[in-house]
Amino acid sequence: MTVDRNRKPKRGLVSKLLQEQKGQLLIEVLVAVAILGVVSVTFLSAVVTSYGAVALADRRTTAESLTRTEIERVRNAVYPITDYTRISTSPAPPSPPPLGWVVSVHADYIDPDDYEVIAAADAQGMQMITVTVSREGKVVSITETNKVNR
C-alpha cells in the first residue's frame, strides 16, 4: 500500500464551518467579556454605595447613643454643671466613648426670663448644656438641653 503524500486530507463539515467563521469566535468572546465587565462595574458600584450608607448610619447611631448617655449623665449630676470632655481614655463610670470618639459638654448660665447667657454671679439656677460629639476631629452631633437647680 502506498500513501500519496501530495494529496490533501479531506476536511469534514465541522472544519469547513470553522474555516468559514474564522475570527467570529474571537469577536463573540470579546463582546461577552465587555458585557461581563459592565455588569461587574455596576454591581461593585452598588456594593460600595451601600457600604458607605451603612457606615454613615453606624456613625449617626453611635453619636446619638453617646449624646443620650451624656444628657442622662448631666440630668443626674448635681447643679451646677462644669465643662468637661470625655475621650476613649477617660475613666469610667459608666464607660468611656469608643476609640476615636470625643464627647464634650459645655455649660452656660442662662436667664430663664429671656434665655440670654449671663454671668455665673447673676445665675438664678438655670444652665444651657451643649453636648458635642466628634469623631476623628469632625463634629457629628450637637445637642442642647437645659439643667435647672432644684
Image (cartoon, rainbow, N blue to C red):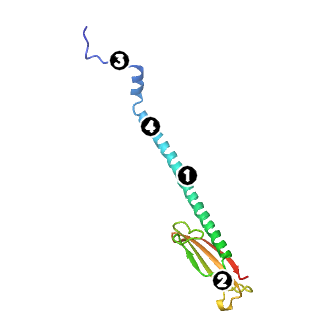
Amino acid at circle 1: Ala
Q: Position of residue 10 (x, y in %)?
A: 35, 17
- Give the distance between the C-alpha atoms of the residues marked 3 and 2, in whole angstroms: 104 Å
Residue at which label 1 appears: 46
Mark nearer the N terminus (3 vs 1): 3
Amino acid at circle 2: Pro
Image quarter (top left, top right, bottom left or bottom right) of the N terminus: top left
Indicate which disc residue 10 carries: 3
The answer to whether mark 3 and mark 1 are in CB contact below 8 A is no
The answer to whether mark 3 and mark 2 are in CB contact below 8 A is no
Looking at the picture, does residue 117 appear above or below residue 52? below
Indicate which disc residue 80 carries: 2
Q: Position of residue 43 (x, y in %)?
A: 53, 48
Amino acid at circle 3: Lys
Mark nearer the N terminus (2 vs 1): 1
**Mark closer to the observer (3, 4):** 4
Local secondary structure at mark 1: helix
Looking at the picture, does residue 24 appear above or below residue 147? above
- Give the distance between the C-alpha atoms of the residues marked 1 and 4, in whole angstroms: 26 Å
- Give the distance between the C-alpha atoms of the residues marked 2 and 1, in whole angstroms: 50 Å
Residue at which label 4 appears: 29
Mark nearer the N terminus (3 vs 4): 3
- Give the distance between the C-alpha atoms of the residues marked 3 and 4, in whole angstroms: 29 Å
Mark nearer the N terminus (3 vs 2): 3
